[in-house]
Image (cartoon, rainbow, N blue to C red):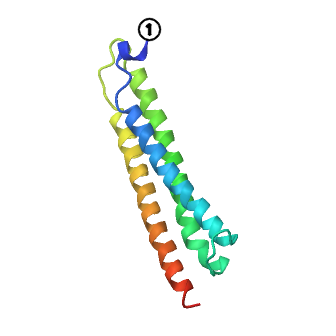
């Protein structure tokens, strides 16, 4: 039997899409900061200045992974609730935590972009 006959689709594809978006954006931020630090991009910035943006992007990647774990837990809880006699619906708790993790990951990405832009604008005065 497919998962659609049991009604297991639910919000999981949307939550996995949130993981992809936040993981890719933060991953590209890490690549950008590493490219600046290794002088792939011509920007005269000390590598010590890049610690804050790199930490923010890596925190975003970590939060994306935690959100994916919560998504898996939500899917597992939802699958377990499809049995006979199961009427409780607690899958929204891990789903909500996954959404919070993805929102924090995107906030880390926005803050990392802001910090990278600030450092890049300071580079011209260095």
Instruction: Decide: few, some or many residues near mark 1? Use Cα within 10 Å; few <14, some 14-19, many ≥20.
Output: few
Relative to residue 60, is residue 86 depicted above or below?
Answer: above
Image quarter (top left, top right, bottom left or bottom right) of the N terminus: top left
Give the x, y percent position of residue 39.
68, 72
Q: Is residue 49 left or right of residue 64?
A: right
Residue located at (56% from left, 72% from top): 52
Q: Nearer the viewer, residue 61 or 83?
A: 61
Residue located at (43% from left, 50% from top): 101
Quadrant in the rendering for residue 111: bottom left
Q: Is residue 120 left or right of residue 5?
A: right
Relative to residue 91, is residue 44 depicted above or below?
Answer: below
Count up the numbered dots: 1
Give the x, y percent position of residue 110.
42, 64
Q: Is residue 3 left or right of residue 63?
A: left
**Which residue is under mark 1?**
1
Residue located at (57% from left, 66% from top): 55
Name the secondary structure under disc 1: loop
Relative to residue 34, is residue 97 depicted above or below?
Answer: above
For the view shown, which residue lies furthest in the front direction?
A: 42
Give the x, y percent position of residue 62.
55, 53
Q: Is residue 124 left or right of residue 87?
A: right
Quadrant in the rendering for residue 46: bottom right
Residue located at (59% from left, 90% from top): 126
For the view shown, which residue lies furthest in the right direction?
A: 38
For the view shown, which residue lies furthest in the top direction?
A: 1
């Amino acid at each position: 039997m497919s998962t659609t006959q049991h009604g297991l689709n639910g919000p999981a594809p949307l939550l996995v899409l949130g993981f992809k978006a936040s993981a890719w954006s933060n991953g590209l931020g890490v690549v950008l900061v590493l490219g600046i630090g290794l002088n792939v991009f011509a920007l005269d910035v000390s590598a010590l200045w890049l610690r804050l943006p790199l930490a923010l992007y890596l925190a975003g990647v970590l939060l994306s992974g935690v959100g994916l774990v919560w998504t898996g837990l939500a899917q597992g809880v939802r699958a377990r609730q499809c049995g006979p006699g199961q009427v409780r619906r607690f899958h929204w708790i891990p789903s909500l935590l996954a959404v919070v993790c993805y929102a924090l990951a995107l906030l880390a990405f926005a803050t990392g972009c802001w910090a990278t832009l600030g450092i890049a604008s300071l580079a011209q005065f260095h």
